[in-house]
Image (tube, rainbow, N blue to C red):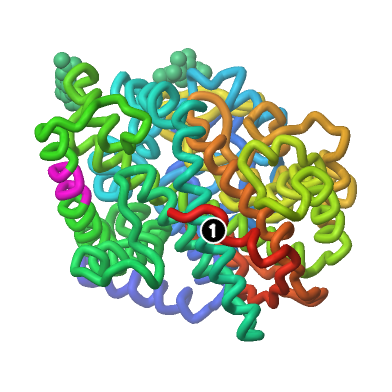
Amino acid sequence: MDIVDIGQRLGSVAFELSSQPRVWLAFLFAAAAWLMSMPYLRFVGKKLPPGPPVWPVLGSLAYLGGELHHALWGLSKKYGDVMRVGLGQYTLIVVSSADIAEELMRKRDSEFCHRSGRTIQRSAAKYVGFDSMDIAFSEYNPHLRMLRKLCTSELFTLSRLHASAKVRTGELEVLLGNFRKYSEKGEAIEVREYFHSLTMNIMCLMMFGKRYYGEDVPVTAELNNFKSLIIDVFDNVGRLNLADLVWCMRPFDLQGINKKWKQIRGRCEKLFGLIIEEHRLRRIEGKTLKDDKDDFVDVLLSCQASDNLSDKAIIALLSNMVLGGTDTTATTLEWCMVEIVRNPLMMQRMQEEVDALVGKERGVEEADVAQLPYLTAFVKEIFRLHTPVPITLPRLNESASSLGGFYIPPECTIFVNTYAMAHDERYWDRPLEFNPDRFLGSNINLVGNDFQLVPFGSGRRKCVGIALGMTMVQRTLAALVHSFDFAPQPQASISESYLLVLRNSIPLKVEATPRLPAHVYHTTTL
Ligand SMILES: *[C@@H]1O[C@H](CO)[C@@H](O)[C@H](O)[C@H]1NC(C)=O
Ligand SMILES: *[C@@H]1O[C@H](CO)[C@@H](O)[C@H](O)[C@H]1NC(C)=O
């Protein structure tokens, strides 16, 4: 028998077999099983967390349809509180219970406080995090500790918060004034745009003393540039980047996200770089330092020499603050308004509480909000039911470790599904109901001690701007219900859409009627 003969015989056998579909199926099945087990062969004998099937190349993407936080929540009900999910070539670990979250973020915080530019967020860390020089993407290293220390001891201190109250009051007056204008015209107000302007102006004024939003702001090239950059940032930063997830896609950047991110980084560097230069010049011209009127850039420049803080790090920090401090707050405020128009009795209860404390002859001040228990409970319930950041930023341990009794392979990115915990029947009575009363007389707070409700994270990677964010939300809400009655809309939509933050997918419109004497509006001007 010569070689050709063997070839022919094999060929005919193969032909015969191939005409039987069952054989094909078996073959495909075997190949799939083999490929699927490939990434995990290294961990034979280890107790990996359970999870949905992981397919070659795409991982578990097929099981993650719809809104990501809901998909993960659904899967965790099936697979458990520590779950393994494949995403592209990476393995994610998703935590969905308070005790495991506590193990991760408190008891073993120091083992899991890392983040790495080499994992799933490779391009985000490079472009959005300015080579991991910012707070969100930096590894846990001396640079990050320095940045966090600057935030807690210089930028977000109580005294600086008090000193900047005037800025927030001014912007709040503008917001109330705008609502009033609409009500005089008898028109409904689409609140999103106004909350966005409010939070952007406050953050920009606090960071570098400028405001970009409002009818009174002169239109300049810088203004247009800033606004279009911000739109680009919010539209693009939260996108899922296939070039990061699947190694063989890396050179192609099919979605064009890397290109976009690179552009955004360049524009941020240019814009914030100019602002830093302006401040530097002003300082050389002899403006006093460490004055309460200084904005963040002034403070950071004065720390620059002693703290080894590069311009790039300042730019990264400013961009983090825009990302972390504006849309989150504006979105939370919009959810507050949604629940107000859906629950007129709750609005009334807040109004009675504010009236009793403040009266009707002056506006609400920041110091007032500490004495409004029902309003505080209402805001907590908003953070619970409409978790603005449903999935925390990732944590990671570069070597192999364990969590909740499971083996965690090296370099697994760990996420906490705060949304799932905040809606879990194990922790909350009738979790899908909006009911602020559940927080009255309860000690649960939002600062990261009660792990069933950690909207700001906890431990070494906790959000640094909690006090500022909470102040802005509570005071704005108090001022809104104090100043206006809002027409009920029992059917107002609460459907969610998630990209970076969890928004109401249908922008809310409200009808406001002033309820204070005319002279109380506009008591403060900017
Ligand atoms: C990673 O986890 C292991 C085991 O839990 C621990 O010994 C190690 O210190 C952690 N690595 C870091 C960098 O903290
Ligand atoms: C200053 O920071 C840079 C980068 O963050 C680092 O490479 C350098 O070693 C630091 N210098 C000192 C004196 O700490």
Compared with residue 489, is residue 349 higher up or lower down, i.e. above or below?
above
Q: Position of residue 525 (x, y in %)?
A: 47, 55
At 73% from the left and 57% from the top, the residue drawn is: 482
On whether residue 277 falls in the magenta region, the answer is yes
Span highlighted in magenta in the image: 272-278
At 28% from the left and 41% from the top, the residue drawn is: 316
Q: Residue furthest front?
A: 519
Compared with residue 136, is residue 102 higher up or lower down, i.e. above or below?
above
The answer to which quarter of the image holds residue 403 is: top right
Q: Secondary structure at mark 1?
A: helix
At 33% from the left and 61% from the top, the residue drawn is: 212
Q: Position of residue 24 (x, y in %)?
A: 50, 71
The answer to whether residue 97 shows anywhere in this view is no
Counting labels gives: 1
Which of the pair 421/4 is nearer the observer?
A: 421
State which quarter of the image contains the C terminus: bottom left
Which of the pair 284/227 is nearer the observer?
A: 284
Q: Position of residue 243 (x, y in %)?
A: 30, 58
Query: Residue 121 vs residue 69: left or right?
Result: left
Compared with residue 304, is residue 131 higher up or lower down, i.e. above or below?
below
- The residue wearing badge 1 is 173
Query: Residue 357 vs residue 409: left or right?
Result: right
Q: Main secondary structure of the magenta part?
A: helix
Which of the pair 11/313 is nearer the observer?
A: 313
State which quarter of the image contains the N terminus: bottom left
Q: Position of residue 128 (x, y in %)?
A: 30, 49
Ligand 2 contact, mark 1 (Cβ < 8 Å): no
On whether residue 104 falls in the magenta region, the answer is no
At 69% from the left and 41% from the top, the residue drawn is: 369
Query: Residue 319 vs residue 518: left or right?
Result: left
Compared with residue 165, is residue 174 higher up or lower down, i.e. above or below?
below
